[in-house]
Image (tube, grey):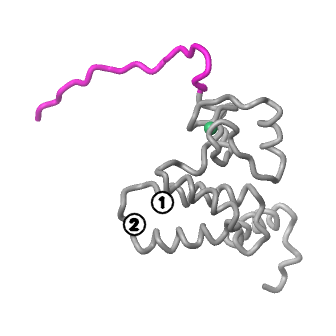
């Protein structure tokens, strides 16, 4: 588009961010992208036995993002009915519930490399941070009150 260069920096930035979402597979895949693709592929593969054609093509696209050696290890876990990718939440592997050394967790957040859970051998993906929700570590006072439902019979 002509006049593109005249856009103010904040607008350009948001344009770039939007563009990034659509061209992620064109770019050289970072390990984070690969692992997220693998996680998404796993979610399709581990659901019920039936997948829609749309899911099949999405699965093919996601697997296309993942280098063969990584896909190979992942598939070995999947064929055994296991998950190939585990979320790492609060430093704990969500599949085997092993707590990772803090240094390893830190390197996982910054380093662009593959991490396997040293306990269960699954690929580790950092779970999305949810700062608003209280984490399950430690005693958490539950404030949610379950109200008895009033039956309104019309
Ligand atoms: Zn594990």
Quadrant into which the N terminus falls: bottom right
Q: How many marks?
A: 2
Indicate which disc residue 152 carries.
none
The residue labelled by disc 2 is 51
> N-terminal of the two: label 1 or label 2?
1
Above or below 73: residue 61: below
Q: Secondary structure at mark 2?
A: loop
Above or below 73: residue 3: below
Mark 1 residue CB less than 8 A from any atom of ligand 1: no
The structure residue drawn at horizontal position 64% and vertical position 30%, both measured from the top left corner, is 98
Q: CB under 8 Å between callouts 1 and 2?
A: yes
The residue labelled by disc 1 is 44
Check disc 1: other Cα within 10 Å, few if <14, some if 14-19, many if 20+. some
Q: Tell me which segment is drawn in magenta.
A: 134-154
Quadrant into which the C terminus falls: top left
| 2 left or right, relative to 55 | right
Q: Secondary structure at mark 1?
A: helix
Q: Position of residue 23 (x, y in %)?
A: 71, 73
Mark 1–mark 2 distance (CA, rounded to whole Å): 7 Å
The structure residue drawn at horizontal position 63% and vertical position 36%, both measured from the top left corner, is 93
The structure residue drawn at horizontal position 71% and vertical position 67%, both measured from the top left corner, is 67
Answer with the quadrant where ligand 1 appears in the image: top right
Above or below 1: residue 28: above
| Outermost residue, bottom side | 2
User: Which corner quadrant of the image does residue 144 belong to?
Assistant: top left
Q: Nearer the viewer, residue 27 or 120?
A: 120
| 38 left or right, relative to 101 | left
Check disc 2: other Cα within 10 Å, few if <14, some if 14-19, many if 20+. few
| Outermost residue, left side | 154
């Amino acid at each position: 588009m002509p006049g593109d260069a005249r856009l103010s920096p904040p607008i350009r930035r948001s344009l770039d961010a939007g563009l990034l979402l659509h061209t992620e597979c064109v770019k050289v895949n970072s390990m984070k992208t690969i692992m997220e693709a693998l996680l998404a592929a796993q979610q399709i593969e581990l659901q019920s036995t039936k997948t829609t054609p749309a899911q099949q093509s999405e699965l093919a696209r996601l697997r296309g993002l993942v280098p063969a050696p990584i896909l190979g290890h992942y598939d070995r876990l999947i064929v055994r009915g296991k998950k190939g990718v585990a979320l790492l939440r609060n430093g704990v592997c969500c599949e085997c519930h092993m707590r990772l050394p803090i240094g390893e967790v830190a390197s996982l957040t910054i380093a662009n490399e593959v991490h396997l859970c040293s306990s269960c051998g699954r690929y580790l993906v950092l779970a999305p941070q949810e700062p608003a929700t209280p984490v399950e570590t430690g005693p958490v006072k539950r404030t949610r009150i379950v109200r008895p439902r009033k039956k309104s019979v019309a």
